[in-house]
Image (tube, helix red, strand yellow):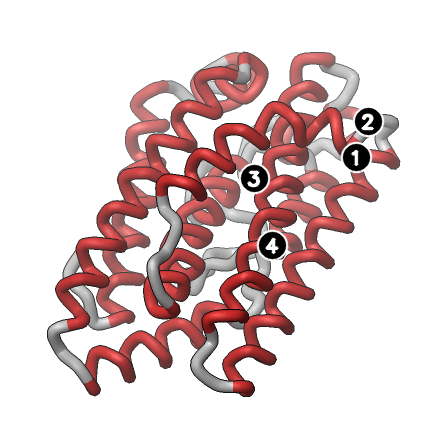
Amino acid sequence: METPDKTADDGSEHAPATPTASQNWEQAAADPTYRAAVVDLLGALAYGELAAFERLAEDAKLAPSLADKAELASMASAEFGHFEKLRERLARIDEDPTAAMEPFAAPLEEFHRLTAPSDWLEGLIKAYVGDSIASDFYREVATRLDTDTRALVLSVLADTGHSSFAVEKVRAAIEAEPRVGGRLALWARRLMGEALSQAQRVVAERDALSTMLVGGLADGFDLAEVGKMFSRITEAHTKRMAALGLAA
């Protein structure tokens, strides 16, 4: 996963520090609810990275040139590397990686079913816009995590190179055929709506994650702050659309 609008490595630009954010994993995991929330988070991230790997490998088949195909294959490999990091961490904390990912398979597959791209350019937009929205969300959550888990989460959200690649290709396509811009802008808006709806559904169905976001483990991260979080995600989306030369 990646986002071109990076913040400070510790995510401090997004939200204030919390007591949990100064603890290591062993200290924070003494709270069973916190542990459950982290297992959910790592499971969701792991499945997201695995799905990103599969999607990029599939999108490579639509690439118009051998160079583009190789670029996407390289990015797919990077996503699989992120998946392996998450799988290894889950195993290291005595959690079954497959069991941790299972609750998130159906909703993420439904999202991908609803947002299947029809061509190469829509695939690039989906990877750039859709994955970046997810990355923005996880970066926000990362500000509430223990130091060890936060470092892992931020490392797997690192840019795989898709951002600049997608911007370059999409802008060139719009310049060559301006009418393409309108279609891609509508597609990006649809992705934004589906991505936010999917994120909200997943969180609502997982009690520990909900607690982390709206109270309890969140150390005062109340509903008003959740609203601000989604406003920041929307603002970042608008900037990404501008980078593509599209209206948000």
| In front: label 1 or label 4 | 4
Q: Earlier in the sequence, mark 1 or mark 2?
A: 1
Classed neighbour count for the residue bearing mark 1: other residues with Cα under 10 Å, few (<14), some (14–19), many (≥20): many
**Type of residue at label 2?**
Glu
Tell me how far mark 1 sits from mark 2, CA to CA: 5 Å
Measured from the top left, where is residue 154 in percent x and y?
61, 51
Residue behind mark 1: 90
Position of residue 136 relative to residue 174, above or below, is above
Q: Secondary structure at mark 4?
A: helix
**Type of residue at label 1?**
Leu
Whether residue 164 sits left or right of residue 87 in the image: it is: left
Toward which corner of the image does residue 233 lie, by quadrant? top left
Classed neighbour count for the residue bearing mark 2: other residues with Cα under 10 Å, few (<14), some (14–19), many (≥20): some
Name which residue lies at 17% across and 69% down: 181
Measured from the top left, where is residue 108 in percent x and y?
50, 36
Whether residue 184 sits left or right of residue 46 in the image: it is: left
Q: Secondary structure at mark 2?
A: loop
Position of residue 159 relative to residue 193, above or below, is below
Tell me how far mark 3 sits from mark 4, CA to CA: 25 Å
